[in-house]
Amino acid sequence: MERPLLIYDGDCGFCRFWVETWKVSLGDRVDFAPSQEVASQFPQIPPEKFAEAVQLVLPDGRTFAGAEAVFRALALVPGKGWMLWLYEYLAGFALLIEWCYRIIARHRNFFLKVTRLAWGRHPGPPSYHLTRWLFVRLLGLVYFLAFLSLWIQVGGLIGADGILPARGFLGAVTKELGYARYHLVPTLAWIDPSDAFLKFLCGAGTLLAVPLVLGFAEGPLLAVLWIFYLSLVSVGQDFLEFQWDILLLEAGFLAIFFAPWRVLNPHWRGSGNSNPSLGLLWLLRWLLFRLVFLSGAVKLLSHDPTWRNLTALNYHYWTQPLPTPVAWYAAQLPGWFQKLSVVGVFVIELGAPFLMFLPRRVRFLGAALIAYLQVLIALTGNYAFFNLLTLALVVVLLDDRCLERFLPATLVARLATPPAPRRPGALREVGLTALAAVILAVSGADLLRTFGSPDSLPRPVWEAVAWFEPFHIANGYGLFAVMTTSRPEIIIEGSSDGQTWLAYEFKYKPGDVGRRPPWVEPHQPRLDWQMWFAALGSYRNNRWFVNLMVRLLEGSPPVMALLAKNPFPGQPPRYIRAVVYDYRFTTFSTRRATGDWWSRQFKGLYFPVASLKSQ
């Protein structure tokens, strides 16, 4: 006998199921045989033992039974020896696991039903070629939308005549940080911070995302797109500090190593020239876990009363930055339904993430719950590409057998022939291990910061974690930790004589009370979003707002292009000011009577009357 032999009960459906699964992992490292065929060859094993447990016979004649036999067989697969290590060295583990084994062995028919319910009827480990194919293309679509959305705004936001010019920002960083600037502000804009180069980054990112979606040069294109988007985020200042921006960078960084690397792929619609890395797959799942679970955890950790008393959704629909028309109707729902919905949010955000670590069909349930919540969020709020990006991450919870049910049969047939299995080179294995260690260490430190005390780790550890922060490869998340319970809305007004004031109309944020809330996702009007944040505080805490007022007095064309209506088309106003109103949705009766979607009440002055000195 040249190889270990695993002997099982050939009449047991439960045994056959798991043997077929193990065969795929073990390959030619172990031989398998039913006891009904080979038991007579091993007289040293009592016949009744074959019916009680699997038996592993080694070439040197040693035999092992039960859980130990399984663990010793699986330990022959690189990376799976940890189970045998626990069995041999963790006190009490062997006794516990053998007890569980005996319980299962005595009730095999029942556990066969449980197995099929949790894992499905098809034995064998799942494959993820379709999973990777779909995830990479969805990520390419997100990149396309993100770059395109920013392309049409970048001049007014961070251009030379924009609100927060990138050139001025980089100049201030240079004076403050010296050579450390290249690490702390990683951007290609150090080469050229001009408007043309910023638009080049956006335009090139938009165009390069197209071949990525089509399946060409996936790994190289993902690397370029990540560098371009990081370059824009690093100089975007207030306008590119949203959670979905850093989420895209983290997901995009992991995708570089998850995607196939082959510039000329003969099966351009297929999965590339390598098998998907299970390690990278689990890092992507870990990202999704942190995103969803932390969004629920921060709501409780903030001690916000609206989340604690389940009234948060009484306010959310009309106080969120850019509601959709559906949000108006959702806000009219009765209080008991809003409270029940908050319970549903907590159940999904705090419970569904843990399902992704359970058997495949239970994991699919977690995927469905997270996707359901994302669709509801997308229907009631304009959150740019966030929902689509989260749904792309949900895809990594699915496997090929699941996706085959939803993708066209002709497409599945083209993708159904995976490349021949091959082990990654030693250098790649070392690199992926180091990558996983960095991601887990940085994200683990962030979790510790969220749930515990930063003092629990030594200072050198935090310094090491801080070194990676500018690259956004592992981030902290948590949406709507505190629910806003009112909606102050800034209205900017200009005047040529200081007596008659005309309002600037924004493209998407509330202004005219009769204008219906817009549909704008996946585009993100970043100035409109920042106006929502500015209204929650003071202009003194929002340097960019002061710059906006200056640009309006100057009549800056790229800034004016960010607005829907310029009440001074001939020449800029002499004076400018900002007032604040308290907005909220109207009721059914009010809307029937007036046609208004919003009602508002004047609160006072937000920004004092100002003019340029030269005027």
Image: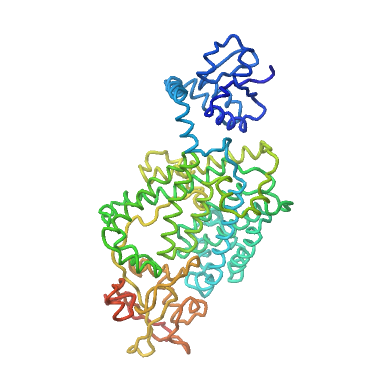
Q: Residue at x 33, y 62 (%)?
A: 316
Which quadrant would the C terminus be assigned to in this image? bottom left
In percent of width and height, residue 63 lies at 58, 14
In this view, which residue lies farthest toward the top? 44
Colour scheme shown = rainbow
Q: Residue at x 39, y 75 (%)?
A: 516
Which quadrant would the N terminus be assigned to in this image? top right
* Picture quadrant of residue 15: top right
Compared to 402, does 66 lie above or below?
above
Q: Foreground residue, 8 or 599?
A: 8
Q: Is residue 479 left or right of residue 217?
A: left
Q: Foreground residue, 115 or 508?
A: 115
State the count of labels.
Answer: 0
In percent of width and height, residue 509 lies at 40, 73
In percent of width and height, residue 496 lies at 39, 89
In this view, which residue lies farthest toward the front? 11
* Picture quadrant of residue 310: bottom left
Q: Foreground residue, 27 or 383?
A: 27
Q: Is residue 100 left or right of residue 141?
A: left
Compared to 327, does 403 lie above or below?
above
* Picture quadrant of residue 110: top left
In percent of width and height, residue 446 lies at 43, 46
